[in-house]
Image (cartoon, rainbow, N blue to C red):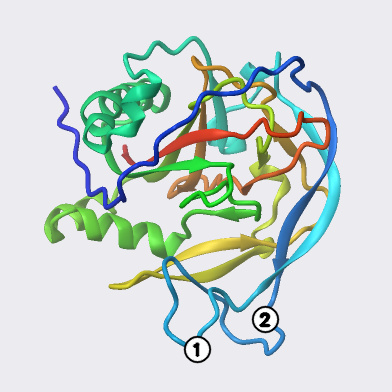
Amino acid sequence: MTTIETQTQTATPPTLTPHPSIPKIPRGPVTATLNFYQPPPDASKPFNYVEQPPLGHPQRNYSDKEQTLTIDDIRNREAEFNLNTHAFAAVQDVRSQADRALFDDDDAIKRVYYPEVEALLLKATGAKRILLFDHTIRLASPGANRAPVNRVHIDQTTASTAQRVRFHLPEAEAEEALKGRYRIVNVWRPLNPPIVAHPLAFADSTSVPDEAMVGIEHRYPDRTGETAAVKHTDGQRWWYWSGMEEGERLLLQCFDSEGGARVPHSAFIDPRSEEGAGRESIEVRALVFG
């Protein structure tokens, strides 16, 4: 039996609220706006503080460039996409013992939901080992501690993924793991389905060139990691999964040491959504070995 290893440092999860009645789920392609990378005006190294920045410093020194584009729907096309090529995959008919109330309890999430995520990833990726290292609950409601991120990004870069491996494993074990295939995959699910407002957009990895990626210093109180912002380039193909249900999971590959498929993603505002239909979701992040 595989042991689940975690290094989660999360605040007490917020109390989740029931989803309002939704008369209609928007389906099909949608024209919407995504926020892409706009560099700092002084051409300095871009940075973002994860928590409160030091006195006199901005939260981040770069800005956004809006781009209106078409986001296509993978609904009824789920089987066409995979992690190795597109860097995202859709999994359906997932059974779970984790009901809504469980996600109010951080320890219960790790005790009940983490084993489900581990089993899902082992089956979906064919990996030899899964190390779950954190999770985030996001609420699209005023004053939420962690709201949906309406900015195109990738959670990790080549450098920060290797740093993650070394951070979570003993030195000798980490160096051995880095000789083989290692990945970071997020498992994303709705907590108040179906997802209608603030759905998640994700790009086909093959349509986003490496030169569109910009490393961002991700500054924690005790260390500095790196995420990737993304510039808009011609030919990018964007997707979302309309009306995601309770038994559906979206796999988002942020890094792969073999093949390199990685998925830019962002929440977005669907102009067809009913006002007030806020989104609640959880993403669990995993190091995937082998």
- Residue pointed to by mark 1: 56
Closer-to-camera residue (286/262):
286
Decide if residue 270 is in sight here: yes
Label 2–label 1 contact, CB within 8 A? no
Give the Cα separation between the discs numbered 2 and 1.
Answer: 17 Å
The dot on residue 40 is 2
Q: Position of residue 71 (x, y in %)?
A: 79, 37
Seen at 64% across and 59% down, the residue is: 210
User: Can see residue 234?
Assistant: no
Local SS, label 2: loop
Name the kind of residue labelled 2 in the image. Pro
Relative to 60, 132 lies left or right: left
Left/right placement of residue 19 relative to residue 105 reads right
Q: Is residue 212 above or below residue 267?
A: below
Circle number at residue 251? none
The amino acid type, in three-letter code, at marker 1 is: Gly
Where does residue 182 sit, x and y in percent of width and height? 35, 46
